Amino acid sequence: MSATPKLTVTTGPLPASEKVFKAGVIHPHIRVPMREISVHPTANEPPVTVYDASGPYSDPSVDISIERGLPRLREGWVEARGDTELYKGREVQPADNGFVSPAKMTPEFPVKNTPRRAIGGKAVSQLAYARAGIITPEMEFVAIRENLGRQQAHEALVRDGESFGASVPDYVTPEFVRDEVARGRAIIPANINHPELEPMAIGRNFLVKINANIGNSAVTSTMAEEVEKLVWSTRWGADTVMDLSTGRNIHNIREWIIRNAAVPIGTVPLYQALEKVNGIAEDLTWEVFRDTLIEQAEQGVDYFTIHAGVRLKHIHLTANRVTGIVSRGGSIMAKWCLHHHRESFLYEHFEEICEIMRAYDVSFSLGDGLRPGSIADANDAAQFAELETLGELTQIAWKHDCQVMIEGPGHVPMHKIKENMDKQLEVCGEAPFYTLGPLTTDIAPGYDHITSGIGAAMIGWFGTAMLCYVTPKEHLGLPDRDDVKVGVITYKIAAHAADLAKGHPAAKVRDDALSRARFEFRWEDQFNLSLDPETARSYHDQTLPKEAHKVAHFCSMCGPKFCSMKISHDIRDAAKAKDGMAEMSAKYRDGGDLYVPVKAPAPTVG
Amino acid sequence: MSATPKLTVTTGPLPASEKVFKAGVIHPHIRVPMREISVHPTANEPPVTVYDASGPYSDPSVDISIERGLPRLREGWVEARGDTELYKGREVQPADNGFVSPAKMTPEFPVKNTPRRAIGGKAVSQLAYARAGIITPEMEFVAIRENLGRQQAHEALVRDGESFGASVPDYVTPEFVRDEVARGRAIIPANINHPELEPMAIGRNFLVKINANIGNSAVTSTMAEEVEKLVWSTRWGADTVMDLSTGRNIHNIREWIIRNAAVPIGTVPLYQALEKVNGIAEDLTWEVFRDTLIEQAEQGVDYFTIHAGVRLKHIHLTANRVTGIVSRGGSIMAKWCLHHHRESFLYEHFEEICEIMRAYDVSFSLGDGLRPGSIADANDAAQFAELETLGELTQIAWKHDCQVMIEGPGHVPMHKIKENMDKQLEVCGEAPFYTLGPLTTDIAPGYDHITSGIGAAMIGWFGTAMLCYVTPKEHLGLPDRDDVKVGVITYKIAAHAADLAKGHPAAKVRDDALSRARFEFRWEDQFNLSLDPETARSYHDQTLPKEAHKVAHFCSMCGPKFCSMKISHDIRDAAKAKDGMAEMSAKYRDGGDLYVPVKAPAPTVG
C-alpha cells in the first residue's frame, strides 16, 4: 500500500466573511452555520447573511485534518433516538476497490467507525419521523438554515415573483419543514452513518439547491484530487456532492470523501457493482448489487441513484434516437436487460432495495436512465415512459418510508422545458425534481455550463428543487478543479435567478446590497458580496490595479467622464441642492411654459 | 502624427470550413457568403451550412490589407439606384478627435472616400424602397442569407417550436423580406456610405442576431486593438458591432473600423458630441449634435443609438432607484435636461434627426436611457415611461421613412421578462427589439455573460430580434480580446437556443449533425460543428491528447468501460444481430412469460 499522499485542501473564509452560528430552540444544542458578509462602515448597512454550504473548512477557528475527518456532530442525535444499533458491519473486499494491486491502492481512511442500522426493521428515515409528528434536530437545523438568519415579524418581506403554484413561505418554521418532508415534497438526505453532515433540505418550497459531481475515472484523477474537489466545490456553493467514481479504489476514496463531507454525498451504486464484475454488464446480479448497497450505506452515503425506471419494455423506444442512452447507469441496465431477456433486477427487487435504504435513511434519487442526450431526443416516448415508472416507484418507496427525489433531463430546448416540470409534478406526487441542466442546445461543447445554465435557471423557476451542475468539460473529459468552480458558480447563478423569479422573500437582499455597493462605488463591497469575489476583483484590477482605484467613481469601461453612475450621483446632488428632483421635474410634467414643441423640419441637410 | 501601427488581424477559415457563395436570381451579380462545415466521409452526410458573419477575413482566397479596407461591394448597387449624389462632405475638425495632440493622434485611414447623400430630399432607406414595392439587392442578399443555402421544396421541414405569434416562414423569399421591412418589422441597417457591408436583417421573423461592443475608453485601448476586436468578434459570430469609443481619436478610429467592417456598425453619436464639448454635458447643443450626426453618417455608420426617450418629465421617476440611470447616454441627457430646465434637445429636434438619417439610410436604435441597472429597478415607471415615448417616436421616424429598432433592458428577473416583450410589441408597432441581456440577477460580477445569457435566451425566444452581448468584464472594466470571444460565444448560444425554441425550421440541423457526430465518436466532426472548435478540441485533449484518442469510443469523463454511448452502440449491434431491438423488446411489452413479477420483500437486511 502506498503512503498517504500529502493532502491539502483550501481553507479559510471568503473575503469580509464571518461564519456565524444560530442555536436551535426545540433542540438547543444544534448550531446552524451561515455566512455574514460585512460591508464598509460608511454604508451604514448590516452584514448580508447568505447560505453557507462550505462546512468547517471556511471556519478559521477550526483545525482541519483530513486524516481525522470532520466532527461527528450528528452522532449524539442519532443515538438519542434509540432506534439504531451499532453492529459489526461488512468486511471490505478486494472487489470493493476494483481488485487494485497493493501498489496502486488508495490508503484506507485512518479511522474505522462502527456502522449503525435500524433495530428490528424500523424505518429510521426523516420521512418516518416526520409522519410520526416528530421534529428532529435535522428538521430544525434545516428550518434555521433556510431562514438565513432573518427573524420572524421583524421585517417587511416583499413577495414579488411567479412561483407557478409553489408554497414558499415568508418564514420557515420547523413545523413547516416537518410537514414538507411528511408529504414527500422535500427530503433531508441524512444517512445515520454520516454524522459529519450539516443537514439540508431539497424541495420546491425551499431555496433551490445545486449538486457538484466529483469522482475519478479509469483514465484519470486521484483521491487527493477528489477530496480537494469536494472541499473546493462546497466552498463555492455546492449543496450536495455526488461521487461518481468509476475507476479503481472506489471504496477507499469514498470513505475519505464522506468522512470529510459536511454536505450530503450521493452515489450511483451500479458503478461499483459493475467494477466488481470486472466491467461486464451482463455479469451483474442482484446479489452483487445488494451487497454494494449495504457496503455504501454502512459508509454513510446519503442518497443512491437507482435506475429502476429502465424497464425492459422501454428500451426499444430508444432504438431510433439520435444519441441513444446517454446515462451510464441507464445504458448498463439496458445492456443487462436485453442480454438476459429479463426485466431489470432493480425493478424486480425494488421493495428489497427499499428495505435496505429505510434501515439507514439513504434517500432514493430515482435515476433518469432514459433521459434525452440531444435536442432531437427531448421529451420523447422513452423519456416519459421512464418517468411514469418513476412515479409508480415513488409510491412504493414512500410506502416503505423511504425518502425520494426524481432525476430529470438532459437536453431540452426551451419550449419543451415546462412540460417536463408539469408532467413530473403530476406523475410523481410532488416528490422533489433533480435535473441535469437541461442543455438548451447541443452546439457548444466547451460551453455546456452555459447552454445548460439557461435551462437550469428556467426549470428551477418552474419548480425543480435541485440542479445538477454541468462544467465546461461536459462531453469532452473529466473536469478539473477550475472546471468545478466555473460549474458551481454557473449553477449558483441559475439557482439564485430561480429563487428571485419564484419570489423567495429573502433572495433579493443580496442583489440589492450588491447593487447599492455598485452605485456607491464601494468596489470592495461589490466584490465581496458577489459569488466569486476573487475573480471580480482581479477582472477589475486588470485595467485599474491601484488601491486608489478602489474608491474611484468610475472603472475602465467608461472612464471618469462617462460613468453613468457617477453622472447619476451628480444629478441627484444637484437636485437636492435645488428643490429636489421630483419638484424640478414635476414643474414640467404637464408641459408647462418651459416645454418647447418639436420644430418643423429644417429645409436642407448636409 | 505617429506612424501607422503594425496591424494584424486574425484571418483564415475555421476548421473543416469553406466559404461558399450563392448568387442572386433577381440580382444575379450578388454573391451571398455562407459557411459549409464538412464532416468525415464515413458519416456519409452533406456539409452543414451555417450563417457566416465573418466577412472576407475567413476567406483564404482574399488578400487582406487593413490599410486598403474591404471591397466596396455595394457601391454599384447604390449608384445604380440613381437617387444619390457624391458631394464634398464635411472637413474633419480637431474636435472630432477630441483635440488630441499630434503625437497621440491615431493616423487617418489612408484612403479618402467621397461621401454620398440623397438627392433632393428623397429617402434612400431600405424602408422607402420596400414601401415602394422594390426588392433591392440588399433585400435579396438577406433572403438568401437567411435560408442558409436550403432549397425550397426539397426538404421536409419540421416545425417544432413555440414562437408566441411570430411568423417565421419555412423559406425566406426576397418578397417576404421586402414585406417585413415595409411594415417596419425588420430593418436592414445599410448606410449608403458603407459599401463594404454584407447586408443583414434584424427582425423577429429572421434568425436572432447578436451585437458585440468594441471601442476604446479614456483609460485604455488603441485603434489596432479595436480593429482586431472587430474582426475577432465577427469571426466568432457577431452580426453587428457597435463602436462605443469614448476616448480620443473617435473619428479616426471609426474610419478604420467601418472601412474594414463587413457587418453593420452602430454608434452612440452623443459620446462624440460630448467629447467635442470637452466632456461637459451641460455644454451640449443641438448644433454640435447635428454636426456629429452628419460627420458619422458621411463615414458610413449604419445605425445610431439616439436617447430621445429620456424626457425631462421622466427623470424624476429615477430619483428613488437603487442604481439610478445606468445608460451613459441616458445619464448625459438627464444631466443636460435638469441643468437647463429644458426638454431634451434630442426629443425636440427629432424630426430634424429623421431628415438627416433618411438621406443616408442610417437606422435608428432608439436608446433605452432609462433601462434598469439592477433587479430592484426592473420594469419600473421610469423604464416604461421611456418605452411609451419610444413608441411615439417610432411612428414619427416611420413617417420619415427611417428604419427603426428599439433598445431594451437591462437587469430583469426571469418572471418580469415576458412583460417587457409584450409591452414593446404593443407600444412600438412591432419594430424590432434589441436588448442588453437582460441580466437575471445582480450577484455575479465576473460572470455577467452568464447571468445575462439566461435572460437573453428567454427574451430572444419571446421575440427579441437582436441581443447585445455582455462579457465577463461587465461592471468591472473594458473587455479585452478573450472577453470579447467569450461574450460572443455566449450570445450565439442564447440566440441559437431562441431560434430552436421558436421552431425556426433550419435551426435544429446543426444540433442534430453535431449530436450524430458525438454519438458516432467522430470527435473531429463534433469539434468542427461546434461554436468554438479550438476550445472543444483543447478541452478534450487536456486528458486525452493523442491522435488515437480522436477515434476512441470514450473520453476521460467515463473511460472505455462506462461510456454510455459506447454501450448504446453495443446494444444496437446486438439487437441487430438478433431480431432487432424493437422485436426483442416488443415480445415483453405486454408482460409475456419472461416477465418476472417483483418479489416479496426479503425478511432480513444487513
Image: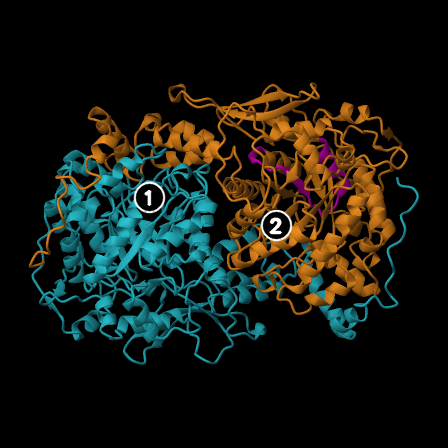
Chain colours: A orange, B cyan
Q: State left or right for residue B485 relative to residue B550.
A: left
Instruction: Check the residue under mark 1 and report the chain it is in.
Output: B
Q: Which region of the structure is painted magenta? A: A235-259
Tell me residue A333's x, y (percent). Answer: 76, 58
**Whole-Å distance between the Cαs marked 2 and 1?**
36 Å
Residue A252 in the magenta stretch? The answer is yes
In the image, farthest residue toward the right? B603
Tell me residue B540's x, y (percent). Answer: 56, 54
For the N terminus of chain A, the image quarter is top right
Image disc number at residue B383: 1
Disc 1, SS? helix
Instruction: Check the residue under mark 2 and report the chain it is in.
Output: A
Residue B58, image quadrant: bottom left
Residue type for callout 2: Leu
Residue under label 2, please give it. Answer: A436
Residue B562, image quadrant: bottom right
**Does A242 appear above or below A575?**
below
For the C terminus of chain A, the image quarter is bottom left
